[in-house]
Amino acid sequence: MKPSSGEMEASWSKKLEPTDIALDLTYRCNRSCGFCFLDCTDLKSYKRKELTAGEINIFVDSLGALKRQFFIAGGEPLLRRDFLKIISHIKKRSHRCLITTNGTLLDEKTCLALLKMKVDEIVISIHGDRDTHDRVVGRKGSFELLEKAAGFINASKYKTATLLTFWCTINGLNHKRLLNTYVALKKLGPDNVAFNHLDYITPADRAATAGIFSRELSCPLLPRSSSAKTRFIDTKKLAAQISKVKAADADEQGGVKFSPDLHARQLSAWYDGKVFFKKPGVCRAQWNQLWVSPWGDVLSCVPLMHTLGNIRQRPWREIYNGAEFSAFREALLKAGGLFPICSRCGRESYYKANIDIAQDKLSGLPRPRF
């Protein structure tokens, strides 16, 4: 008798072992960016008890000898008073570690500690030149704090193994000033500069995905639609700014990155919530990444916030290779490798194909091999 697709999924998913660990330390934040993806949920208002440093260390130890890539984020992870203690334990276990922060709490002492630990990459979110960034995050003087942090890092003799990267999320306030932003950021001496297109959820994509969750997983879909975030973006002016940034960067051979890298037609479709936007490929994060929330929930990803278990209650390997996660992966494959709600997710590492606008449905997708 031929096994069902669910049985096939369960048989090979038991062999899964994540190479990447996304660990959100808190969803609290000391800034108020209007495009924050957490605003699609009620996570910022949750009052659940965050994992202690001791619990996190036990989790890190449970990963065993295989060296992983940690992505530390939030919220603002440096709001945790035990932040350095947590990072120190991760690095003592010889894992790679990337930290994403808004940079406002990166004082000289903290920068020095991270550099001495040989943290692999410090990613600072900077969303414009001085005035624009302060408007975006809702706090005057924020850019100055990032400027000082970059100075501390670049001036240190211990910056031998740590990359400094700036991430800029394209939004309604900065999209007409990307060249100014690029020039301002380059002056701060980063190793890398990345511009990220706005992630958002259209009502149609949410409704389609909610139907899939109801049919296949018998559960509701948590995130709300968020297409209002795009209403002030002029894609023609944005396209012109992107061209200017790429031209300026080519002169410096700087390697600036746009994620995803969209051509003009794709750019227009991305920011038009009424346009059907289809990405081919498979969300490989569900097979090689483990995402843990501040209170220990194992998540499919933060944009979806689909909870599959909690590491306080069950071993993470049991959750990662368990029935709930297998059912989620099976539903994802059945949907073509990506859910409709994933269409404006700009996390390129999550899927295996270049973005395109396809009118035809995907069919005959092979099971992923990573």
Image (spheres, rainbow, N blue to C red):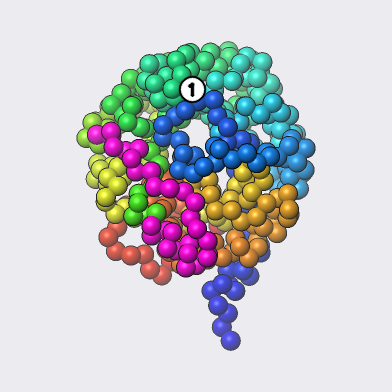
Q: Which residues are magenta?
A: 207-234
State the quadrant of the C terminus.
Answer: bottom right
Q: Residue at x 30, y 23 (%)?
A: 177
Q: Kindly identify the amino acid type of the residue bearing the numbered disc 1.
A: Pro
Give whichever of 201, 278 is nearer the camera: 201
Q: Which residue appears farthest toward the bottom when viewing the image?
A: 1
Give whichever of 52, 184 is nearer the camera: 52
Where does the image place residue 249, in percent across and percent down from the top left? 35, 26
Where does the image place residue 144, in percent across and percent down from the top left? 48, 13
Q: Which residue is mark 1?
A: 190
Q: Residue at x 67, y 51 (%)?
A: 310
Q: Residue at x 29, y 54 (%)?
A: 276
Give whichever of 139, 160 is nearer the camera: 139
Q: Is residue 19 above or below residue 111?
A: below
Give whichever of 152, 222 is nearer the camera: 222
Where does the image place residue 49, in percent across and percent down from the top left? 68, 39
Where does the image place residue 293, in percent across and percent down from the top left? 62, 44
Relative to residue 133, is residue 234 drawn left or right?
left
Whether the magenta-drawn stretch holds residue 369 is answered as no
